Image (cartoon, rainbow, N blue to C red):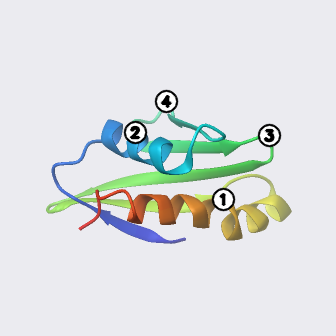
Amino acid sequence: MPTVSIKSDASEADLVAAIKSELGSDYDVEPKSSDKEMITVRKGTMSIAHVKLERTSVGMNAHVHGGGLIISRLVNELGIAKKVTQAIRSSGLTE
């Protein structure tokens, strides 16, 4: 599970907007309504990544991992989760 350090002045909404901007309109990016510290990224029905946000004293860490069942989770770790991690790193929100 890759981890990316986010600037202290960035919010969850900033991160959602940055991921949407970097990945484009083919991806659905939305905060998980029941958990304000989680963002879900989807492309189609089987390609899912989760971004778990962890607040720290100097900002926040984004832990990115693939979602789905056991086999698809492995595929998503190497596919969409990697793309989401790269999108966060190139967004300008990282330290």
Question: Considering depth in this image, is 72 or 42 the residue closer to the camera?
Answer: 42
Please determine whether, in this image, residue 95 is positioned above or below residue 39. below
Q: Is residue 15 left or right of residue 10?
A: right
Q: At numbered mark 4, what does the secondary structure look like: helix, strand or loop? A: loop
Q: Which mark is residue 17?
A: 2
**Which residue appears farthest toward the top when viewing the image?**
33
Amino acid at dot 2: Ala
Mark earlier in primary sequence (4, 3): 4
Amino acid at dot 1: Ile
Amino acid at dot 3: Thr
Q: Which mark is residue 80?
A: 1
**Residue at the disc numbered 4:** 34
Question: Which quadrant of the rendered structure holds the C terminus?
Answer: bottom left
Mark earlier in primary sequence (3, 1): 3
Count neighbours of disc 1 (C-alpha within 10 A) and say few if under 14, some if 14 to 19, many if 20 or more: many
Tell me the mark number nearer the camera, choosing from 4 and 3. Answer: 3
